[in-house]
Image (tube, rainbow, N blue to C red):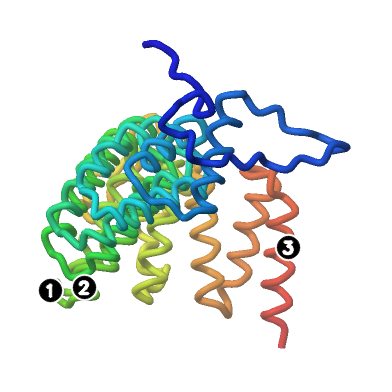
Amino acid sequence: MDELPLYSERPEWVDVVPIPQYQDVDALAPINYSEEYQDATDYFRGIVKTEEMSPRVLQLTEHIIRLNPAHYSAWQYRYRTLIALESSLEDELRLMDAFAIEFLKTYQVWHHRRLLLTALRSVDAAAAELAFIARALEADTKNYHTWSYRQWLLAHFNDEDLLWSGERAWTENLLERDVRNNSAWHHRFFFVWGSGVRKGDEDREEILRRELTFTKEKIALAPNNPSAWNYLRGVLGHTGTPYASLSPFVKPYTATSVEKIDVVDLDNPVPSEGAELPCVMALEFLADTFEQEGGSQIPKAVETWKLLANEFDTMRKKYWEYRIKEALQASEP
């Protein structure tokens, strides 16, 4: 592809007075812009000053964004120009698809899509966005901006069952592929406790049983996966369920080896064969259970924290000693 001439060399831009960026001659760390970028942004400042909004402005802002996808002013002025020209926002979304994949970690890319979806107010466009986000996450399954955008989209179209209905199956597929995907666990909590429970179209107790079953199965698969244990704590905290109700499930994970069990308990799956035991997260959960129960159980919590501090989680020794001190002080008469 032939290199395009600078804007200062194009006859169709001769009517625009470029405005150079001021740089102090004694700047401690002057920015060494490329000639192409400096030329484009000089003309961008020129059109902003005259408040021009035209097709050539869209071409200019696209050029600048390709050179610097974090140029917030170029993004914002581009959006204003699209609205002023009544341009096709669906076409703009498709044009920006490549940008989003190429510049996944650039916030402005996703903010621009938010503005477009807000202006479109289209459920069909939102459904297409969910499919696009899924493709984007194939490139980076844990990118914060992509996940944040997906949650914004669902929250913005809050009452659209069509958008919410496939989320559980989709995240379960992600967790089947990578049970340690903390972003997928976080998203599961967002939609499970923000859709069905909120709308009242599912029984709260049924949801709790389902989520506990799902999480236990994933913990059994990978006992030392903190994401699943954090999700478990979140579910119990959100529903006000006592930690002690999970003791039959948790205790086998605090053993030094997988215990032989003659009777299969489908409600409490045991650690998978070859699991590294005892599981630090299980010991911590057990100690927190004792602390939550209080009274005569506090000494058991202290003993468990001592095991963590001195044997199984020595990296956080100071933290466990702090927990012991706090618990003993709180239990004093």
Which label lies toward us, 1 or 2? 1
Q: Which mark is residue 201?
A: 1
Where does label 3 land, which residue? 322
Residue extending furthest right?
Answer: 26
Q: CA distance from mark 1 to mark 3?
A: 44 Å
- Total numbered circles: 3
List x then y, in percent, for residue 59. Answer: 37, 36
**Dots 1 and 3: beta carbons under 8 Å?**
no
Label 2 SS = helix
Residue extending furthest bottom?
Answer: 333
- Is 272 left or right of 107, judged from the image as shown? left
Q: Which mark is residue 205?
A: 2
| Residue 111 seen in this snapshot | yes
Q: Earlier in the sequence, mark 2 or mark 3?
A: 2
**Figure quadrant of the C terminus:** bottom right
Q: CA distance from mark 1 to mark 2?
A: 12 Å
